[in-house]
């Protein structure tokens, strides 16, 4: 956030019965002198579920942050809301997990450098030392935590301790080639973002570009999703595809895939950091 | 609209200063027992302009249609709103203008046949008789009004008279190869939709596919827009593109163009009929 | 083919060792006075397999058709080629199988009407009578062959007899809601084209749009492929995708899906009819 | 090129009358023991022009490089060919011109780092010193040559001298904010690649994203093209587009534009370096 911009409050809301909610929330903001900057909502016809994102200007708002939370707690009880409130002067803190591939990491760092990311990368954690130079160039702390099949538990404890000590809000897996344990994932619900190197649902298992080549697909893709205990089955945040042909060898598919991966991951991270993603069950509502 | 669906009111709103509007409108709907089905809004940071689309269920609403209009008139004065209110049990009536090419006309008729169009095609008007068979197949009235360079004014008077007699709401130019006069256009502001056979802004003038071939473009497009007095300069509703290569001869580009044209036009017409398009100056806000 | 266009020969070739083939084939055409109109080839680095499509002008060619076949037979033995030769004055004969949905059928018929299909639809075969009117409008013979779970074998015999009697070259399943038996498929290798209503590989089984909605995918697709004994596993000819969002209800996904299905199927059929598709194992080489 | 890969010859050919050329060239390669790795050709129906790209393995070829050139010179006279021959062990040498924006430069450097570029960046030349750190990180020589309105000619002389001294094959303008003189351009025909920040043909002049916003376009683009004396009118090598909406402010369009620019420029540079681009008049044939 630029230092001279006014502070904004962003509220994400999710509930089952929507009658009167929009009016109640809009009146709440208006009656305290707030100016609604952006309101987006979605009512699902089939499930009846309701989703809303509301952003308003805190300049001139006559309630302090604790008072806002107190009023929202009351509204939440009345309407049975699930809600999340953030303020734009809190810059989310990210840790990026990576292994050897640099393309996704570079893209996130470049996005941050240009001031577009909407968060701050406070740590890059890798099980190899290869990406240290990249982090040094961008002046980002880099920590190697080796992961062997025999020390997975201990490695995760070190990772978790580091995340705690740095007060991290979101973890991004930027082609991190290790599977996180169910315990780790459970500690960070809807706060770990992974980039999967194919269009999901799609080729199960490893080497999707080889599978794509063998099957002669005409389009390949990449998918960013929240990590859940079930591998590659978490809520999808963003996807993109690119047309390919028989002329593309496996390595061409991998190159096109790298372009897709970095683009889709960075976009998903930005959507998350701007609080534009609501999770419901196993899918997301993205207020783009 | 299926006969058993409840009636919905849809309000499009546009104003310069948005303070309190969302709350006022949401409260208006809620206080009279309405259930907001869909609310979408957009505040433009640079211009300060504000746009909103609000749809609510009339089942259980305690105001009649005249009373709704009366209240909205008051709100409009207070907030200096431009507004438009429609009810879902009014099915918009369309006239399609065409010449010889059938692809866009077919697409609109097929979309109507399948129940997806959101409006009723009450007339097809052409300056040739070629498309009569198509209309007969779909059981749509077909009228030939010849247009010669010497009788343009009279032809337009016949067209306008027909539109009036049929109580038409929207005119769709489905590859109609005649330029409408400024007078005609002025009678139907933001209610005539044209399909332009290229990506706008783009090649000026005729034969865009020949120009595209000569220039070796790698992507071609089509653009649906509202018709204004200035040719091809009206507000853009929808666009799409397709990748092409040097292997595509002019006729291949034309075929790809036909696919784009019918798809983009039908989508634009549906967006308009669902009251998802707001015009401001020379551009549109599309609540997709 | 327009009546005044010269006749073209098109040769598709596939072999394992490519040394000298291009020279041999080019010399064959040249030495007999042929003018190569289009030559496209592809050598696969990993498998070593080689694919070629060669089209030349028969005007001025000093060999008759039988002599051409005789010479190609010799070349094929020398180079161990698999090959297929067609002449542009043979217009391929198509049968379209459909059930109730009309969108893919309409698209093929419109493409034929406009002279773009590259083949002739000689029969529409359906297990319902709903599409008779459409065929009548386009003046295409329509045959109802009911298919019940108890008469599948007999129904297929009637279908096969009709295809034989009409000298059909290719069968197109235009949302035909019946599974063909392995025997039927074996009789028409690489000559039955199906449109699958999702991006393959993807959601297994029925109702892909419901699955897509539940999983919150951001992109949907359609896939045209040759039919093999294994359901939905045949070589992919063409695919396309469209971006969707949480605002799209299942019926919106289905509508977008219909647009994709008709476009992808028609494009695949045209590619096949123009002899641009080579099958190798379970994938295709498409010389687009 | 990986050191253990065999050397390949790549021939680009362009002529007006194609009779016998494919046979002559294929026979030339075959009769000297060459193995054709890739042959792509295109005959333009309307203009009659013919284009071919032929790549073959030099392992086992019984002619030296000078002898190859001598034979091709003879063939060229016989068939009136324009031709260009390159060998894969010559790695093209690139100079990148940039000003302050880093996104395109980073993308080219990352592509080179990963071994995908197909050329070597031997110099980055800028009229500002801002990008020195980036070049240092990637260990690429960086030269500042200031350009003032009063010293343009002298600055270009310094640039040209540097290009000569470094034996540069291709110049890439990676968001270089200066117009090159006609003299400079004439010295480097079809060897200067520029990235234009919009879909061409499109908005003339500066600030295309502001124009796009004002016009409400639904799709934005970027175009890579060869530089000619006429600004932004040179042959188009590659283009891409992205869908946008009214929610995108000018800065969102600029961010999406940056993604497009870097992707399109890098792809165009790779196509050029792999000798896949043939220029004819004001358009390109791209053998992708």
Image (tube, coloured by chain):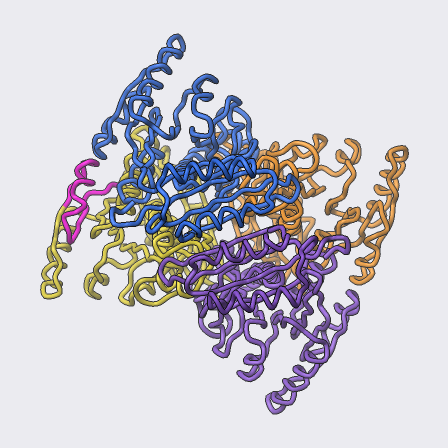
Chain colours: A orange, B yellow, C blue, D purple
Q: Which residues are magenta?
A: B120-142
Q: Decide: is A282 above or below D13.
A: above
Residue closest to the eye, A190 or C65? C65
Q: Is residue D43 magenta?
A: no
Can you see residue C214? Answer: yes
Q: Position of residue D176 (x, y in %)?
A: 61, 74
Q: Decide: is C42 above or below B220.
A: above
Q: Decide: is A236 above or below B182.
A: above
The outermost residue toward the bottom is D150
Tell whether A285 sits left or right of B90.
right
Q: Position of residue A167 (x, y in %)?
A: 80, 48
Residue drawn at point x = 63 percent, y = 72 percent: D171
Residue closest to the eye, B73 or B6? B6
Q: Position of residue A184 (x, y in %)?
A: 79, 35
Assign the N terminus of chain B to one quadrant of the image.
Answer: top left
Q: Quadrant of residue C127?
A: top left
Can you see residue A112? Answer: no
Residue drawn at point x = 87 percent, y = 48 percent: A144
Residue closest to the eye, D36 or C29? C29
Q: Quadrant of residue B83?
A: bottom left
Q: Position of residue A139 (x, y in %)?
A: 81, 62
Residue drawn at point x = 33 percent, y = 23 percent: C163
Residue closest to the eye, D169 or C199? D169
Q: Decide: is D81 above or below B191.
A: below
């Amino acid at each position: 956030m630029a230092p001279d911009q006014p502070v904004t409050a962003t509220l994400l809301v999710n509930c089952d019965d929507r009658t009167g909610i929009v009016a109640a929330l809009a009146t709440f903001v208006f009656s305290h002198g707030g100016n609604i900057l952006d309101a987006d909502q979605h009512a699902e016809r089939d499930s009846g579920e309701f989703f809303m994102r509301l952003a308003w200007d805190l300049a001139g708002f006559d309630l302090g942050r604790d008072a806002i939370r107190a009023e929202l707690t009351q509204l939440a009880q009345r309407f049975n809301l699930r809600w999340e409130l953030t303020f734009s002067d809190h810059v989310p803190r990210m840790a990026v997990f990576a292994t050897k591939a640099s393309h996704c990491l570079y893209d996130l760092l470049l996005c941050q450098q240009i001031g577009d990311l909407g968060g701050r990368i406070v740590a890059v954690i890798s099980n190899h030392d290869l990406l240290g130079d990249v982090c040094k160039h961008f002046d980002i702390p880099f920590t190697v935590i080796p992961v062997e099949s025999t020390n997975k538990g201990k490695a995760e404890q070190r990772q978790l301790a580091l995340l705690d000590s740095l007060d991290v809000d979101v973890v991004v897996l930027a082609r991190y080639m290790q599977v996180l344990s169910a315990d780790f994932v459970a500690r960070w619900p809807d706060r770990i973002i992974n980039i999967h190197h194919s269009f999901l649902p799609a080729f199960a298992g490893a080497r999707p570009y080889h599978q794509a080549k063998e099957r002669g697909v005409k389009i390949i893709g990449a998918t960013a999703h929240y990590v859940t205990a079930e591998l590659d089955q978490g809520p999808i945040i963003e996807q993109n595809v690119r047309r390919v042909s028989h002329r593309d060898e496996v390595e061409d598919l991998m190159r096109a895939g790298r372009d897709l991966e970095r683009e889709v991951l960075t976009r998903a991270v930005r959507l998350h950091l701007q609080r534009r993603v609501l999770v419901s069950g196993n899918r997301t509502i993205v207020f783009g």
